[in-house]
């Protein structure tokens, strides 16, 4: 069993930055695929970025060049560095995880929600213009 707990959400102005954290417990990071998803008001949940156990990662086009996903295996913590935030980034952000080999974790169709067995409760990010 894996428990995930997000933190770091806040209200910021457009152009600002935030770092989200996701503390994981109950399972080692080896062969674990971890990701950030978000759900904006009135919209479906979407994948933001994913990182494999070997450190390779990818992100959705709308955040490329602005968001970076990373992990600290020693601390069992996943991060999402968000720069140049836009009002359309306003959403509840969730971290999620499942066991996977790196190549499958970061495949093009990586954001299939049913693949991710473990989910956190979410942290709110609000960006004002």
Image: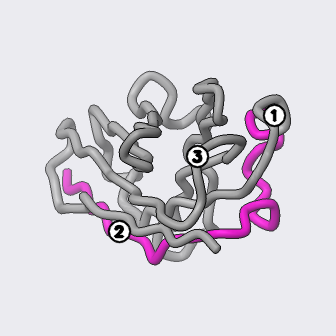
Residue 8 in picture, x, y percent from top left = 24, 58
Dot 3 corresponds to which residue? 29
Q: Nearer the viewer, mark 1 or mark 3?
A: 3
The residue that appears at 60% across and 37% down in the rendered structure is 51
The residue that appears at 64% across and 26% down in the rendered structure is 54
Dot 2 corresponds to which residue? 123
Quarter occupied by residue 1:
bottom right
The residue that appears at 35% across and 68% down in the rendered structure is 123
* CA distance separating discs 3 and 2: 22 Å
Dot 1 corresponds to which residue? 108
Labels 3 & 2 near each other (Cβ < 8 A): no
| Residue neighbourhood size for the residue with mark 1, other residues' Cα within 10 Å, grouped as few (<14), some (14–19), many (≥20) | few
The residue that appears at 33% across and 39% down in the rendered structure is 82
Q: Nearer the viewer, residue 87 or 30?
A: 30
Labels 1 & 3 near each other (Cβ < 8 A): no
Tell me which label, 3 or 2, sits earlier in the chain.
3
| Residue neighbourhood size for the residue with mark 2, other residues' Cα within 10 Å, grouped as few (<14), some (14–19), many (≥20) | many
Look at the numbered disc 3 and give the secondary structure of its residue: loop
Indicate whether 43 appears above or below 48: below
Left or right of 2, for residue 20? left
Residue 28 in picture, x, y percent from top left = 58, 51
Q: Which residues are magenta?
A: 105-129
Indicate whether 101 appears above or below 118: above
* Magenta stretch encompasses residue 109: yes
Residue 9 in picture, x, y percent from top left = 26, 61
* CA distance separating discs 1 and 2: 26 Å
Tell me which label, 1 or 3, sits earlier in the chain.
3
Residue 74: image tag: none
Residue 50 in picture, x, y percent from top left = 61, 41
């Amino acid at each position: 069993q894996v428990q995930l707990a997000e933190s770091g959400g806040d209200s910021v102005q457009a152009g600002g930055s935030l770092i989200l954290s996701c503390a994981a417990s109950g399972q080692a990071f080896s062969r674990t695929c971890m990701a950030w998803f978000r759900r904006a008001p009135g919209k479906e949940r979407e994948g933001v970025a994913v990182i494999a156990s070997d450190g390779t990662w990818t992100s959705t086009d709308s955040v490329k060049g602005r968001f970076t996903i990373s992990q600290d295996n020693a601390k069992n913590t996943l991060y999402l560095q968000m720069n140049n935030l836009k009002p359309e980034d306003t959403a509840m952000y969730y971290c999620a995880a499942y066991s996977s080999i790196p190549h499958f974790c970061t495949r093009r169709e990586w954001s299939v929600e049913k693949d991710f067995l473990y989910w956190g409760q979410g942290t709110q990010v609000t960006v004002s213009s």
